[in-house]
């Protein structure tokens, strides 16, 4: 199995690249942001709870997020691997993910982080906001808040997996195919290692 964490600030291109990667490597895409938006659009209890955090650019509490993620992973036992997009965003989330995968006899293969400068991120998200329909994409102060949350709470997850020799950063600036090719260079090495192990 190939279990990848696609990492990076909001607007770094994780969702877009994940869509192409899942097809290329036959993986299952889990985006906690998409899951929360689905719940919100259906006005479920979980969605209403998440909404109050999302509209302020804050993180939804760990336990709520971890429980939602766990049920999605468990519901998909027969996949070739997962791409986690937007999760984990805190150290407790990372520890919970590791524990969950361990219970399933699995582990994280690699965390790949997309590096994009802050000003480019703000421009990208404001552009995306023109047709994404996401209220948190239209307000520059909320975008900056999300970037601050990323720097203060989420970026530590990179170091957490670096401690296990699993974190890699690549340049996230460029065309979609350029960034995709950089990702494939990293992932193909892991695929080759998996094939050797078998
Ligand atoms: P995203 O689409 O990944 O940028 O997520 C949009 C919003 O959903 C974030 O700003 C958070 O409010 C919430 N969210 C998504 N994933 C998580 C997570 N792993 N932990 C906490 N909050 C999350």
Image (cartoon, grey):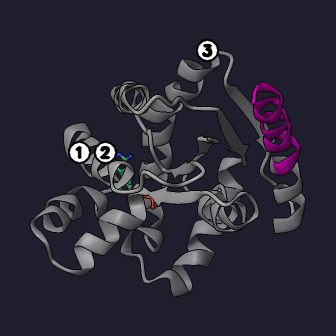
Picture quarter with the C terminus:
top right
Q: Which residues are magenta?
A: 184-198
**Local SS, label 1:** helix
Check residue 70 in the rendering and tell me which mark sits there, or answer none.
2
**Local SS, label 3:** loop
Whether the residues at callouts 2 and 1 have beta carbons within 8 Å, the answer is yes
Check residue 164 in the rendering and tell me which mark sits there, or answer none.
3
In the picture as drawn, the residue positioned furthest to the bottom comes out as: 131
**Quadrant hosting residue 54:** bottom left
Task: State the residue position of label 1.
Answer: 67
102 relative to 23, above or below: above
Check residue 51 in the rendering and tell me which mark sits there, or answer none.
none
Question: How far apart are labels 2 and 1 at the CA level?
Answer: 5 Å
Residue 175 in view: no
Number of residues whose C-alpha sits closer than 10 Å to that of mark 1, classed few (under 14), some (14–19) or many (20 or more): few
Given this view, does label 3 or label 2 mark the residue nearer the observer?
2
Picture residue at 68% right of the left edge, 16% below the top: 165
Count of marks, rendered view: 3
Left or right of 97 on screen, residue 178: right
123 relative to 153, above or below: below
**Local SS, label 2:** helix
In the picture as drawn, the residue positioned furthest to the top comes out as: 163
Q: Position of residue 107 (x, y in %)?
A: 53, 29
Residue 132 in view: yes
Left or right of 178 on screen, residue 101: left
């Amino acid at each position: 199995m190939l279990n990848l964490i696609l990492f990076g600030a909001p607007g770094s291109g994780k969702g877009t690249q994940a869509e192409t990667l899942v097809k290329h490597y036959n993986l299952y895409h889990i985006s906690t942001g998409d899951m929360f938006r689905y719940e919100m659009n259906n006005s479920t209890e979980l969605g209403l709870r998440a909404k109050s955090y999302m509209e302020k650019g804050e993180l939804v509490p760990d336990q709520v997020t971890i429980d939602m993620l766990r049920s999605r992973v468990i519901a998909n036992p027969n996949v070739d691997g997962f791409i986690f997009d937007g999760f984990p965003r805190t150290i407790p989330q990372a520890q919970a993910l590791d524990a969950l995968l361990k219970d399933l006899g699995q582990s994280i293969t690699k965390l790949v982080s997309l590096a994009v400068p802050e000003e480019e991120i703000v421009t990208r998200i404001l552009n995306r906001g023109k047709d994404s329909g996401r209220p948190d994409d239209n307000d520059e102060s909320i975008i900056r808040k999300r970037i601050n949350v990323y720097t203060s709470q989420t970026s530590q997850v990179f170091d957490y997996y670096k401690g296990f020799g699993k974190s890699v950063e690549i340049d996230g600036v460029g065309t979609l195919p350029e960034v995709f090719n950089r990702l494939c260079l990293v992932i193909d090495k892991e695929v080759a290692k998996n094939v050797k192990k078998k």
